[in-house]
Image (cartoon, coloured by chain):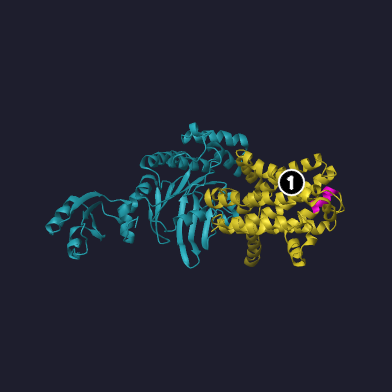
Chain colours: A cyan, B yellow
Amino acid sequence: MGMTNSASEPTALIRAQGLTKVFGARSAVDGIDFEVRDGEFFGFLGPNGAGKTTTMRMIAGVSPRTSGTLEIFGQDPDLHGSEIRGQIGVVHQQETLDMELTVRENLLIFGRFFGMERAAIATRADELLELFQLSDRAKDQVEPLSGGMKRRLSIARSLIASPRILMLDEPTTGLDPQARHLLWDALQRLKRGGTTIVLTTHYMDEAEQLCDRLVVMDQAKIVAEGSPRQLIVEHASREVLELRFPNGTESIDVKVLEGIGDRYERLAERVIIGCENGEAAHARALEHGLDPESWLVRRSSLEDVFLRLTGRTLDE
Amino acid sequence: MTAASSVAPNRTRSRLAAIREAAPHPTRWRHVVAYMISVYRREWQGSVFSGFIEPLVVLAGLGIGLGVLVGDKAAEITGGVSYVAYIAPALMASSAMNLATSEAAWPILARVAWVRIYHAMVATPLNAADVMVGAIAFIVGKVAFAAAFFAGVLLVTGIATSPTGALGMLGISVLTAFAFGAPMAAFSVTQKSDQGFAFLFRLIITPLGFFSGTYFPIENLPFAAQVLSWCTPLAHGVALSRSLALGTPVTYVWFHVGALLLWGIAGSIAAIYLFRKRMLK
C-alpha cells in the first residue's frame, strides 16, 4: 500500500492496474493498466470520448475511481489527494484562468494555493514569465491575450510550485500551427529539465513528436502501448499508399485490394494500403485495373496504427 | 501479528485518511480568502456603493420620508423611539443579508461555471471543502467591513446608544451574513446559469426584507406568517440587532443566535457537499 515504497519500483511515478471509472451505466475507463516513469514524456492518444480526460482526472485526484488500483508517488489519490496534488501541475483543456487578475497575479495567487512563501512565489513567477515569453504582458489583464498566450500562462501557472509531474489535457486543441509549435518547444525544454510530462491528445502528430511512450485508447480501453516508433513497427507497415476514389470505394473487389499490399483499410472515399514499398504497390494497383483520382505514398504514422487497431480514423 | 488483526487497523486508517481528504483543512482556506481579496482589490469601487452607500440611502429615504408619514403613530409600534432609530438596526441586518446573498450568487457561480477557476483550485493542494470554506469566510468578512461602516454611522448619529451595542450589532450582521451566505453558496454551486437567482431573489430575499420585522413588528403579521418568518434567518438578525441598538433587553438571545448559527452551519455543510459533488465527478 501507500506506506511502503520498497514494493514499488522507484522509477514509476504513476501506476494503474485495472483502473476503472463508471458513470451510471457507462464505463468511461474500463480496466486499464499503465505506468508512467520518472522523467518521461507519456501520452494518452485517442479520439474524443475514449476516456483520456477521465483518466487524467483520476490521476490528478479530482475524480475518485470506481475500482482498480492507482498509485501516484506510491500513494493512493483517494487517501492522499492533497499531498499528491501538491506535486502535480494540471493544465485543463478549457481555460481556468482568472480574468479579473493580471497575468502575474494569476501566478502569484496560485503559488499561495500550494502553500509557498511569498518571496519564493515572486521569484518563481518572474522566472516562468520569462520562460514562457510573457514578461512584457505581466501587468496586463488575461482576457485580451491570444489563445496561445493564455495556454502558455496556464502551463506557467501549473508549474509555479515546480511539480514533479505536469499533466496536460489536449494542450494544443484550438491553437494555430505557430502557437502549437511554440508550445511543443516549451514542453520539450521542460522535459529536458527533468519534469515528467503526461499529456492527452487526439493529434497523432503531437503524440509522435513529443511522446517517449504512449498508450492508444479507444472506447475506454487501452488498445496498444509503446514508443511511437515501436507502435508503428508493430502495428503498421513501413509505407502507406493512399488511393482516393471520390465516387466511393464499395465497388472495389476485395481480392484486388488484398493483392496490392500487406494489408488494407477501406474508408468511404479512400483506400489505405500498408506495404513495404508504396511506389511498387501503386504500380500493382494500376495493373489490377484500379483508377484512383489521386494517390500518395507516405511513411506510416500513428494514425495508421490507430486505423489498424480500431478500423476508424482518429477524428471520426 | 495475524492477518485479521493487521487488516482492521489498516482499514480504519484508510477511512480516516479518506475523511481527512474530504474535510476542510484547518488553515488552507486562508489562501482562498487571499485570492478573493486580490480580486476585490481591483473592483472595490463597485461594491462600495452596494455595500456601504446603498443601505444608508435606503435608511435616509425610508427613515426620514416614511418617518414623517408615520409621524406620531410611530411611537405605538416602536415603543417610543423615532422611526429612523427603529428601522436603522434592522436595515443593517437586512443589508447584511442582501450583500451576503449577492456575493454568494454571481461570484460563486462564475467561478464554478463560467471562468471555471474553481476547477483549477481543486487541482491544487486545496480540496473542495477548503474552497467553499474560504469563499464563505470571504463573504462574511466583506459584510463585516460594510457593517462596521454602517455601525459607525449609527454610533455617530446617536441611533446606536452605546459602542458596545454597535459592536454587538456588528457581530449580529456577521452572523446574519453567515446564515445567508452559506446556504446561498450551496444553491449557487448547483446552478448552470444565473436564471435561478432571479427567482430566488424575487421570491425569497426581497420579501424577507419586508416580513422579518424590518419596517414593522412581526407581531402585526398573521400567525402563520409569523411562524414562517421565525423559520428564516433575517427575523432573528433583526430582533437582535434592534435590541442591541436601542439598548432594550435582549430576549431569547440563544434562540436567535442559535437559529442564525444553524442556518450558517447547515448551509456550509450543504455547500461543501454539493460543491464536492459537482467538482469531483
Give, as a single range, the part of the protein colored magenta. B240-246
Pointer 1: what residue? B59
Question: Which residue does the image show at 47% across and 41% down from the upper left?
Answer: A150
Q: Main secondary structure of the magenta part?
A: helix
Inspect this view and state whether residue B49 appears.
Answer: yes
Question: Which residue does the image show at 52% across and 50% down from the upper left?
Answer: B114
B243 in the magenta segment: yes
Q: Is A256 drawn above or below residue A99 in the view shown?
A: below
x and y percent of residue A182 in the render?
40, 38
Q: Given the current orientation, which residue lies at the most extreme top position?
A: A136
Image quarter (top left, top right, bottom left or bottom right) of the N terminus of chain A: bottom right
Residue A106 position by quadrant: top right
Give left or right: position of A285 versus A47.
left
Q: Amino acid at mark 1?
A: Leu
x and y percent of residue B55 in the render?
71, 46
x and y percent of residue A58 in the render?
51, 56
A6 in the magenta segment: no
x and y percent of residue B11 in the render?
63, 63
Inspect this view and state whether residue B268 appears.
Answer: no
User: For this rendering, which residue is in front, B206 or A157?
Assistant: B206
User: For this rendering, which residue is in front, B210 or A145?
Assistant: B210
Question: Which residue does the image show at 49% across and 43% down from the upper left?
Answer: A154
Give left or right: position of A118 versus B214.
left
Image mark 1: chain: B
Q: Is A312 drawn above or below residue B170 in the view shown?
A: below
Give left or right: position of B116 versus A297.
right
Image quarter (top left, top right, bottom left or bottom right) of the C terminus of chain A: bottom left
